[in-house]
Image: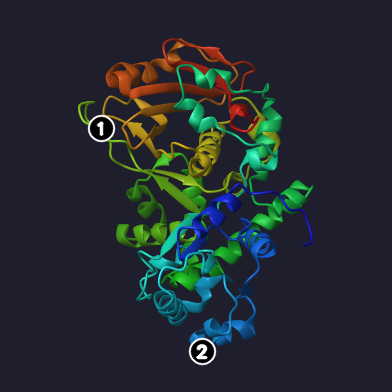
């Protein structure tokens, strides 16, 4: 295997899933490392590995999918599976059903949430475990193992024992500007990285989107991408986007849904508990990769690192949310991810809730200094939830982890990737 290979914690998730499910579906953005992970898996356990980027293989997948499956040695691993469409998915379903509960028979990797595409007549429901592979986390890049989420839900003050290193502002924003795509990490020049991001977005619009469904007005899509990036870490409100683009609200909603299906952005729902006042129910939008978001903002490292840059806070929040989202499948707790805002304008960037109702909350601050006022919403949240509230953290750009009261802690954002 050529090039830089970074060990993925997701490889463990896939191999475990193969022990319990007949089909494992690996979804994620283009260039996030799905092909490399499938290649590593194939090297470990064998079987048949094909890619539908090969035109001859694609032709067979579309014209004789049953024959393609019949000739395979299992497990069968299919990359860019979304290109095979309905005939291939149906052939896989028939084969899986014919072999009863033989687990680990297929690993299907795709650059869209292809099983939700309306043109498919089969979703493989009850047969498949879906794992989403995002761009690299900072812990994977380091590389270290991290238990940040489990520390939040651990015994009292466990989070305060997490190692963290002082944050150099420019170095941190360089992490954001590079992002997590493995290929970008091999490019030393910021100008060349910018060209890579431009080409990536062109491919996203011209190829990946067309495989899901071709929008009616392609000319509007690049501008919508830019507008969404400028709204990263904000609640998703369609009306101003509709006004800016001169499109109906329904059309904009449709396009936003398409962009989410090809992993340009993700949304996190509002947390809506009972008895905590009038809650705003809109989801928050976050661009999946901070490098893409910085590129679409037109901001370089020096601009981002400059104190007072108005975009830095939102970009840092999306960066942190992306890190936490990618940590969840590795954690023992596997909490659900939310944000919170109510009519009294109390806001919390990240709310994590376990299945048994325990809650941890995180605020993100793009500054070195943290004062008592930065904890006011976390204190209110703690006092409102009582024993359900396990831990509240303000992640900042300073040097030290410090207690800030009962179950409240301030810590450098580097605690996300300095390991355990």
Q: Nearer the viewer, mark 1 or mark 2?
A: 2
The C terminus: image quadrant? top right
Q: Residues within 10 Å of mark 2 (few under 14, many from 20)?
A: some
Depth check: give the residue in front, 190 or 70.
Answer: 70
Q: Is residue 288 above or below residue 37?
A: above
Q: Which residue is mark 1?
A: 273
Residue 116, by quadrant, is bottom left
Q: Earlier in the sequence, mark 1 or mark 2?
A: 2
Q: Which mark is residue 265?
A: none
Q: Is residue 128 left or right of residue 388?
A: right
Depth check: give the residue in front, 24 or 103.
Answer: 103
Q: Secondary structure at mark 1?
A: loop
| Residue 265 in the image, given as x and y percentages of width and height | 48, 51
Residue 359, by quadrant, is top left
C-beta proximity under 8 Å, tags 1 and 2: no
| Residue 286 in the image, given as x and y percentages of width and height | 47, 44
The N terminus: image quadrant? bottom right
Depth check: give the residue in front, 211 or 80.
Answer: 80
Q: Which mark is residue 64?
A: 2
Q: Is residue 144 above or below residue 188?
A: above
């Amino acid at each position: 295997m050529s090039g830089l290979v970074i060990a993925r914690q997701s490889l463990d998730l896939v191999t475990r899933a193969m022990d319990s499910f007949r089909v494992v579906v690996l979804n994620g953005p283009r260039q996030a490392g799905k092909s490399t992970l499938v290649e590593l898996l194939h090297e470990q356990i064998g079987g048949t590995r094909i890619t539908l980027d090969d035109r001859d293989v694609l032709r067979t997948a579309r014209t004789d999918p049953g024959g393609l499956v019949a000739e395979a040695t299992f497990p069968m691993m299919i990359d860019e599976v979304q290109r095979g469409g309905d005939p291939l998915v149906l052939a896989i379903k028939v084969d899986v059903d014919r072999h009863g509960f033989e687990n680990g028979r297929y690993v299907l990797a795709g650059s869209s949430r292809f099983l939700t595409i309306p043109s498919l007549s089969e979703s493989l429901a009850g047969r498949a475990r879906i794992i989403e592979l995002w761009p690299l986390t900072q812990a994977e890049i380091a590389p270290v193992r991290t238990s940040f989420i489990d520390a939040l839900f651990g015994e009292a003050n466990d989070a305060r024992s997490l190692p963290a290193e002082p944050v150099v502002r420019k170095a941190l924003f360089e992490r954001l500007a590079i992002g997590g795509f493995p290929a970008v990490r091999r490019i030393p020049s910021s100008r060349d990285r910018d060209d890579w991001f431009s080409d990536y977005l062109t491919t996203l619009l011209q190829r990946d989107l067309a495989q899901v469904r071709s929008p009616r007005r392609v000319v509007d899509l690049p501008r919508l991408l830019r507008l969404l990036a400028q709204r990263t870490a904000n609640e998703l409100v369609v009306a101003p986007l509709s006004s800016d683009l001169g499109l109906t609200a329904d059309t904009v909603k449709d396009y936003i849904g398409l962009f989410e299906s090809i992993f340009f952005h993700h949304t996190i729902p509002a947390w809506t508990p009972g008895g905590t006042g009038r809650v705003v129910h809109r989801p928050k939008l976050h661009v999946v990769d901070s490098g893409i978001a910085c590129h679409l903002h037109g901001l370089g490292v020096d601009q981002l690192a400059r104190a007072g840059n108005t975009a830095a806070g939102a970009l840092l929040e999306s960066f942190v949310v992306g890190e936490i989202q990618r940590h969840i499948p590795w954690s023992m707790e596997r909490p659900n991810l939310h944000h919170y805002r109510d009519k009294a304008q109390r806001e919390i960037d990240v709310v994590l809730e376990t299945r048994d109702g325990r809650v941890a909350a995180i605020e993100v601050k793009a500054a070195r200094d943290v004062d008592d006022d930065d904890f006011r919403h976390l204190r209110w949240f703690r006092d409102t939830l009582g024993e359900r509230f396990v831990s509240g953290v303000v992640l900042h750009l300073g040097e030290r982890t410090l207690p800030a009261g009962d179950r409240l802690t301030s810590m450098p954002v580097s605690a996300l990737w300095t390991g355990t």
